[in-house]
Amino acid sequence: TLEEQPSGLTVNIFPKELTIEGVKATDRYYDGTTEVELTGGSLVGVVSGDTVGFTLGTGTIADKEEGTNKAVTTNIQLT
């Protein structure tokens, strides 16, 4: 029988990485702005029982000129 429990124990709990997959920037016609609509997406890595979500907001392109395969900067926020 154990008469006394060990003391002085420590543990490190590290943050779990979350990723968002499947976000798409919606193609559109020229409208003079740098804003693009974002759609879709799902969180990967959420621990069962945790409540985590995200808001897509909008995407931004570097310039308002027409073009193809333009890079999009996002401002996705975890909630």
Image (cartoon, grey):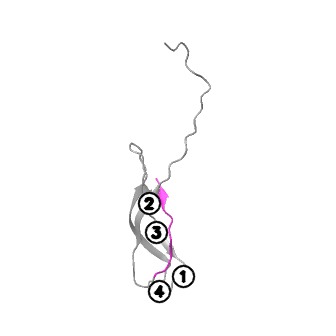
Q: Distance between the Cα atoms at labels 4 and 1? A: 10 Å
Q: Eyeballing the image, is 48 above or below 70?
A: above
Instruction: Please provide percent x and percent y for residue 8.
Output: 62, 26
Q: Is residue 20 left or right of residue 12?
A: left
Q: Which residue is mark 1?
A: 63
Magenta stretch: includes residue 51:
no
- Provide the residue designation for mark 4: 67
Mark 2 closeness class: few <14, some 14–19, many ≥20 residues within 10 Å:
some
Amino acid type, callout 1 = Asp
Question: Which residue is outermost to the right?
Answer: 8
Crowding near pointer 3: few (<14 within 10 Å), some, many (20+)?
A: some
- Residue range in magenta is 69-79
Instruction: State the residue at coordinates (45%, 74%).
Output: 36
Report the Cα–Cα distance between label 3 and label 1: 15 Å
Q: Amino acid at mark 2?
A: Ile
Q: Are marks 4 and 1 in contact (CB under 8 Å)?
A: no
Q: Main secondary structure of the magenta part?
A: loop
Q: Residue furthest bottom?
A: 66
Q: Residue at x 51, y 65 (%)?
A: 75
